[in-house]
């Protein structure tokens, strides 16, 4: 990475059983929740990508060099407070209402650097933040089960409704 050398490697995505060859310009290496990732330009897709270092093998330097584009901003692609999924779309505003039984748990943590938290008279807690990590926010919210209600965005409310329907179908309801 320091030498800005184009590399090739074999990569197996999280949902694949086979390795695929990649040609890549490595811009950054980051640790997200104990896992290491490389972020840069994938020549095959002609786009920015994030690859898990644990699923890379057979790295070969090409001898060709590259330059990181001056307008590349890592924060447009990932949000290290919530996830490492590459998503260059602008952040969305999220609002969650947590039940009173979750109040202490929610209040004692920093969930996101830009969060706003308010406790209501009934003990429930409103948490607001913005992020571009749609997939991770979805999984995070699902993990709270019925202790959380998604207020915004409506798209996330609909996705959770659909996932709950699928889950209920698996359990005979």
Image (spheres, rainbow, N blue to C red):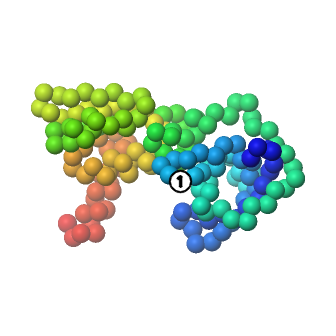
Q: Is residue 47 above or below residue 21?
A: above
Residue 2 placed where, x, y %? 76, 43
Left or right for 65, reference 129: right
Image position, residue 141 (x, y; %): 33, 47
Closer to the camera, 167 or 1? 1
Q: Residue furthest right?
A: 63
In this orientation, which residue lies closer to the viewer: 142 or 54? 54
Assign the C terminus to one quadrant of the image.
Answer: bottom left
Can residue 94 be seen here? Answer: no
Q: How many marks?
A: 1
Query: Residue 145: where, in percent of width, then height?
Result: 25, 52
Q: Residues within 10 Å of mark 1 (few under 14, many from 20)?
A: few
Name the residue: 13% across, 27% down: 121
Q: Residue at x 87, y 53 (%)?
A: 63
Q: Is residue 150 visible?
A: yes
Q: Which residue is mark 1?
A: 35
For the point 28% across and 57% down, the residue is 164
From this view, report whether residue 64 is shown above or below residue 105: below
């Amino acid at each position: 990475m320091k030498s800005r050398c184009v590399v090739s490697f074999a990569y197996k995505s999280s949902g694949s059983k086979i390795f695929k060859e990649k040609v890549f310009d490595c811009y950054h290496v980051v640790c997200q929740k104990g896992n290491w990732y490389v972020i840069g330009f994938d020549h095959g897709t002609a786009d920015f990508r994030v690859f898990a270092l644990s699923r890379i093998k057979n790295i070969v330097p090409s001898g060709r060099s590259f330059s990181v584009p001056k307008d590349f901003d890592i924060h447009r692609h990932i949000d290290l407070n919530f996830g490492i999924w590459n998503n260059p779309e602008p952040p969305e505003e999220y609002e969650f209402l947590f039940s009173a039984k979750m109040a202490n748990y929610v209040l004692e943590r920093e969930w996101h650097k830009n969060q706003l938290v308010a406790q209501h008279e009934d003990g429930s807690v409103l948490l607001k933040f913005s992020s571009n990590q749609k997939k991770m926010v979805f999984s995070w919210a699902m993990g709270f089960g019925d202790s959380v209600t998604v207020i915004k965005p409506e798209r996330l409310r609909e996705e959770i409704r659909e996932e709950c329907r699928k889950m209920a179908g698996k359990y005979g309801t």
